[in-house]
Image: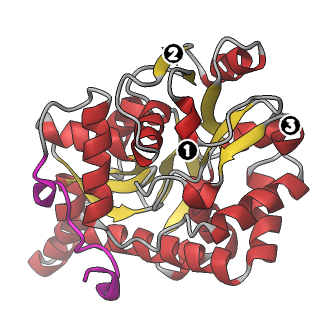
Amino acid sequence: MTLRSIGIIIAAFGIAAASPAQAEDLLVTQYKNDPSGAPYGIALEKGFFKAHGLDVTGIISGAGGGSSVRNAIASDLGYGDVTAAPVIAAAEQGQDVKIVGMTSRSLADLVLIVMPDSPLKSPADLKGKKFGISNPKSLGEMMGVLVMEQAGLKQGDVQMTALGSLSGALTALENGVVDVTSIPIVLFRTRGGESKYRVLVSPKDLPLIPSQLGMATSKAMKEWPDKLRAIQAARREGTKFIYDHPDEAIEILSKVYAPLPPSEVGIMVKQLVEAKFWSEGRIEMPLLAQTVHAMKGVGMLQKDVDLKKVVDSSFLPPDLQK
């Protein structure tokens, strides 16, 4: 064997070691329980990942919160689509992670609901009432803080009541323990939707902060940037497909969100399309600033964050980096 041949073999091993395994799974928080990750399901079904040179074999549904961020950091790929607040908190605490894309633009994947016979007609009527949440510092509590602010209410005007789980908050609403609650739209539709509850704020009127976004480790950004760009490009195509071909997208997503009936999936997708819920990826700094504001409102942060140090938009398609 010649020295040149040996060099080629060594170089080949070096390339292999510098990137994760050829076939990979993507971690997406609450993939089957939240529509934020829908563009990934479309990209997988339509072959958009393969078209961009990625062998994505499946999607792992992360548990949410900080655990999904930790799992994404520890994964071979070093990428995950996760809840926004824990990523910002992790970066503020010194974790080596960056926001590399925005999955959604609002909290329209949540539903603010009351019982049909409730006297509450608008968020302004929440003063002096009990708001059911799963746990303190949750996305549901952040939503409550922002909705109250939009209605001109102050912190303390509404009593946040932690019930330990989303199902617990829903049960508390049904039994009159709380007056209002915020739950994921998939759970809302699974449990009866508009036939059982009344929506207090429509999806298109919910606060504009990203419920989920793409994050990556510095190792991933340094050693396999092309993979991150390919993920962003494929996810963008999945997003555009939902907007351009909603009926076909509903057929695909009915498999993802089963056993939710296809008719309910259709209603959900059309509402989210109307609300312009999904983002093609552009990182909108005002929306992240609003996220930081909400995090401070629920005690997740004690001070402002320099978001420029937390964001890296260089892995987005060029027209989305502006």
Give whichever of discs 1 and 2 has the lower sequence position: 1
Quarter in which the C terminus is drawn:
bottom left
The 10 Å Cα crowd at callout 1, few under 14, some 14 to 19, many 20 or more, is: some
Would residue 259 be seen by someone viewing this image from the given angle?
A: no
The disc label shown at residue 60, or none? 1
Give whichever of discs 3 and 2 has the lower sequence position: 2
Q: Which residue is mark 2?
A: 161
| Point 62% across, 55% down: residue | 203
> Eyeballing the image, is 213 above or below 75?
below
Task: Report which quarter residue 173 is drawn in.
Answer: top right
The disc label shown at residue 192, or none? 3
Residue 306 part of the magenta-drawn span: yes
* Residue 112 picture location, percent across and down: 62, 40
| Point 34% across, 74% down: residue | 229
Would residue 266 be seen by someone viewing this image from the given angle?
A: yes
> Eyeballing the image, is 295 above or below 17?
above
| Point 58% across, 65% down: residue | 39
Q: Magenta residues?
A: 305-322
Q: Amino acid at mark 3?
A: Gly
Q: Amino acid at mark 1?
A: Ile
Q: Amino acid at mark 2?
A: Thr
The 10 Å Cα crowd at callout 3, few under 14, some 14 to 19, many 20 or more, is: few
Query: Real-space Cα distance between discs 1 and 2?
Result: 31 Å
